[in-house]
Amino acid sequence: MDYAMANEELAVRAQEGDTDAENVLYENVYRLIYKLSRRCLTLCSRAGIDEDDLMQECWIGFHNAVMGYQTGRGMFSTYLGFHVKTACMRALNIHDGKMRVVPTVSIDTPVKDGEDITIADMIADESIDVTGGAEITDLQRVVRGAVARLTKREQELVNIVYVNNQPVAEFARAEGISPERARQLQHKMFRKLKRDLAIQAFEPYYMHEGSASDRRGQLWDAEFQIRWHDDHEAIERRIDDGISLYLAWCSDNSIQPDVAGQRRELVMWEAAQLNKT
């Protein structure tokens, strides 16, 4: 059978039980998987996780991406990235057969020393749909609040490109602008998010100097357990990944970051949690 087809078509074939199609797809995206796994290889080595074990987890992430991929949701490689990074997180968390408890930053933390404004004050009032078992951390709430403070045009870019997994060109067509202008707006949007005071307030947390075991347990609140360096560039990259992970989380749970009017679902969920105690 001829497998000279797009990765998205191969994913559909694999979902139908075609193992040859899945193998061909894995070969096609192996370089991407390898590149993403390199980011946490040093941390995994320190935790006693060898490269073969890490790549095995990445293969599981790849398989989960294949099974969960839906046609019309953009390029398979974009969807794959989230699952590979999640696999790296899982490799760190399940090492030695234990799930490490990842501490979270209190949303009552002041966004700047000497100021009364807290992270909670800066989080938008809009609630997200937390039904169906979806969970969101304090960090993701802060990113959500930052997204909600973007302009409507920038929020539309987020929804089209990151939630609906459409190419930037689709946003360009919807806005009647050139693809290059759309990419400029995309870069501007990320710069605004990184400058957001609420996001910046997390920098000291992720620069925490503890023991190696503390760092392994702390630096992955969702994606952040990968620790590169203690310099400014490393902070910027963590913020970038945090934003990307939150947007991928929205996409994976079919949640619009800027959707309002879902307070009732949140209240019901909170009531259910109280009934469990």
Image (spheres, rainbow, N blue to C red):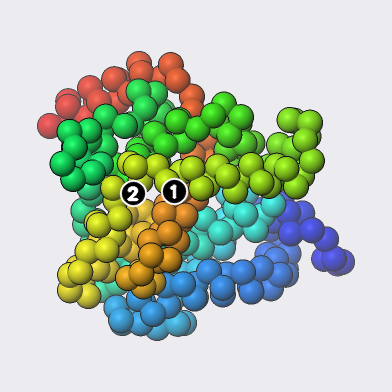
- Image quadrant holding the C terminus, namely top left
Please tell me whether residue 73 is drawn above or below residue 103 in the rendered image.
above
Question: Please, which residue is most extreme toward the front here?
Answer: 114
Give the number of the disc on residue 200. Answer: 2
Q: Is residue 265 above or below residue 223?
A: above
**Dot 2 lies on which element?**
helix
Q: Is mark 1 on a helix, strand or loop?
A: helix
The numbered mark at residue 98 is: none
Q: Alpha-carbon neighbours of circle 2 within 10 Å: few (<14), some, or many (≥20)? A: some
Label 1 sits on residue: 194
Label 1 neighbour load within 10 Å: few <14, some 14-19, many 20+:
many
* Whole-percent x, y for residue 146 in the image: 42, 37
Viewer-nearest residue: 140 or 114:
114
The residue drawn where x is 64% and y is 42% is 185
Dot 2 and dot 1 residues touching (CB under 8 Å): yes
Identify the image quadrant of the N terminus: bottom right
Quadrant in the rendering for residue 118: top left
Report the side of 274 relative to 28 (left or right).
left
Residue 201 visible somewhere in the drawing: yes
Amino acid type of disc 1? Lys
**x and y, in percent, of residue 275 in the image:** 17, 25
Image spot of residue 17 (x, y percent): 68, 57
What's the residue at 17%, 27% (across, down)?
274
Mark 2: amino acid: Gln
The residue at 43%/59% (across/down) is 236
Question: Residue at horizontal 49%, vertical 76%?
Answer: 38
